[in-house]
Amino acid sequence: MNMLEVLRPLRKEPVPPTQAAMGFFTDTSLCIGCKACEIACKQWNQLPAETPHWQGSSYDNTGQLSARTWRHVQFIEQVGRRRPGVTIEEQIAEARNNGDIPQVAPGTALPFFNSERWLMHSDVCKHCVNAPCLEACPTGAIIRTEFDTVYVQQDICNGCGYCVVACPFGVIARDEQGDRQAHKCTLCYDRLKDGIEPACAKACPTDSIQFGEVTQLKARARNRLWELHRRGVSEARLYGEDEKILEGGLNSFFLLLDRPEVYNLPEQPTRPAKNVAPASFWTIVAATVLGLLGMLFFKDEE
Amino acid sequence: MDETRLPTLEVEERIPAPNLLEQMTPIRLIEGLASLTTGYTPDPGQEQKEPTYYDYPVLKQPVWGWEIIWYFFFGGLAAGCYVIASLAALFGSHQDRATARTGYYLSLLALLPCPALLIKDLGRPERFLNMLRMFKVKSPMSMGVWGLLSFSAFSGITAVIQAARDGLLGAWWGARWLARLPQRAIAAPGAFFATFLGGYTGVLLAATSVPLWSRSKLLGGVFISSALSTSSALIGLVLRIFGVPGRALRKLERLEWTALLVEMAGLLAFLRTSGRAARPLVGTAPGERGRTFWGTVFGGGLALPWLLQTSSLIGRKSTQRKTGRGLLISLLVLVGGYFLRKTMIEAGHASSKDARTTLWNARPGK
């Protein structure tokens, strides 16, 4: 009986029938930074709270996605900041010149139309079509589910940490305070199995987080982008909707209001697994050169 | 969660203020070397203009620490000693028997701590057998597990045959049977798996998203060269201590000299192709490992022993070996090899914390 317990991870389970690919469309133009998604995620998945830190940079005191935080709301405050090496007078003059401070007659109300804005963004696992964490995982703990999402089987993961360095978005993490295994968003696999939407999407009061079939979400995202462009929000763009990122795109993609890097999203990361071939090639070159020379040295009879 | 506290705005830290330390020549020398070898001189003004989210890290830091550093070092020694011993056994003459014998024993000795270190490094060590659920060509770690397992078999059987032939196992029928096994025929495929073990660690680091490890694809070549240089140093060290005559040593020294040369060329090519991503390894800013890299790894562990080796290979005509100098060279190479792994892993941690360079690394056409 004990022997069977040991062999259990080796058993191959029947694969459930494939369903339509499911994902998130996170529309940051609708996010109000209420963090309901963070809380709903924590409650449903029974994730322990993290000690909040006063970061001193924004209202974001979560800081990052982690093994215990699978939704993370960023607060990007694009307000005028003192720049090092520039005097305040110079900065004011510059702001007047480029229209950041509107010209108003003395005595009128304070100007409230300016370029300053807060961008809110609920970050989450991207459920990449070519997921680097899945490609790196040596135990097969990370799998692609029947919903085309990326899922960590907690009974298999042995905490080797290779997925942590593989992920180009810094999503998956090892829980050093807890079970020392890799954790990340499951896209509420358990809820999906029962046909209900993930907790964060359910809790989002503005529909900034939308859940559904990836093909439908992408069509909706393109409509939304077109609508925003029509209304003059020319800086709006989609991230991960096309197949540029990691050669296949993201099943959990975003509508952003600035360059991806402003949200700490890498513009076009490459698949780490693509490095295996060239890196192996140069290793073989070095080994061959040294091996042949070694052969010559040892053959040499003086 | 205190360990994962994020850095607050590092604006001031990133702009080097002119201070007394800056005027000191060693730091200026290191900075000069860093700019020269990477082809990138830090431009804080320009870097500051690049957008990021309050400089919070884009990537998660590696969870690998001292266990992996020692594993890389011992694994390299196990692999290199086996390759050198096999070269000596397959192509050498009778005078190289001491080299082969020492190499096979040292290979197994260096290999023994490796599985323990790897299992200790896991978050759930009791689940290490789960590594054997898959044979995944795409994952260097999965291939590494299988490679290490296969090599262990070869290293073990070769060392046991050697022990039987050296009479260490007694004279009973089992030992006599072991001594008759074809060690040289086993060594050929064994050397293949040894080469794999010596090089895959670099490929494993290259197949990540950490800019320092992955931008250049040359880390595997550097690691396999280092495996051979440290191993020839270790075998040479042991042979010298046991007073083996000079002829066998000279072949080893030539191999060591060549491996050091290839390793230096590989490292320089690595730095050049990494560019800005190599800063955590070669620079002097807070968190960067330039002092150790240039002082202990490149200067003390590669360039200096290589020059000493050059002078003794050229200058020496008599068969009388300068034992002291040989021992010094071996020690320098071994210490340098260890610190190569250590700085590479530690600088990888720093690299994954650097949001701006991570984002720069992921820009198309960069």
Image: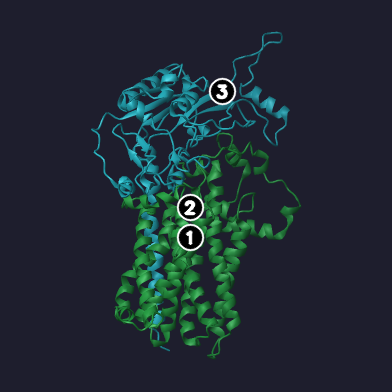
Residue A233's place in the image compared with B343, above or below, is above
Q: Which residue is mark 1?
A: B71
Find the distance from the CA under tag 2 to the CA under tag 1.
10 Å
x, y percent for residue A222: 36, 23
Which residue type does callout 3 highlight?
Answer: Trp
Amino acid tagged 1: Tyr
Say which quarter of the image contains residue B114. bottom left
Q: Amino acid at mark 2?
A: Asp
Viewer-side residue, A246 vs A144: A144
Q: Secondary structure at mark 1?
A: helix
Q: CA distance from mark 1 to mark 3?
A: 47 Å
Q: CA distance from mark 2 to mark 3?
A: 42 Å
Whether residue B132 is visible: yes
- Discs 2/3, front: 2
Please name the color used to draw chain A.
Answer: cyan
Residue matched to label 2: B121
**Residue on which disc 3 sits:** A118
**Where in the figure is residue B34, as x and y percent of width and height?**
59, 56
Are the numbered discs 1 and 3 placed on the same chain, yes or no? no
Query: Disc 2 or disc 1, which is closer to the eye?
Result: 2
Does B298 sit above or below residue A118? below
Residue A176 sits above or below residue B266 on the image: above
Is residue B84 shown above or below A140?
below
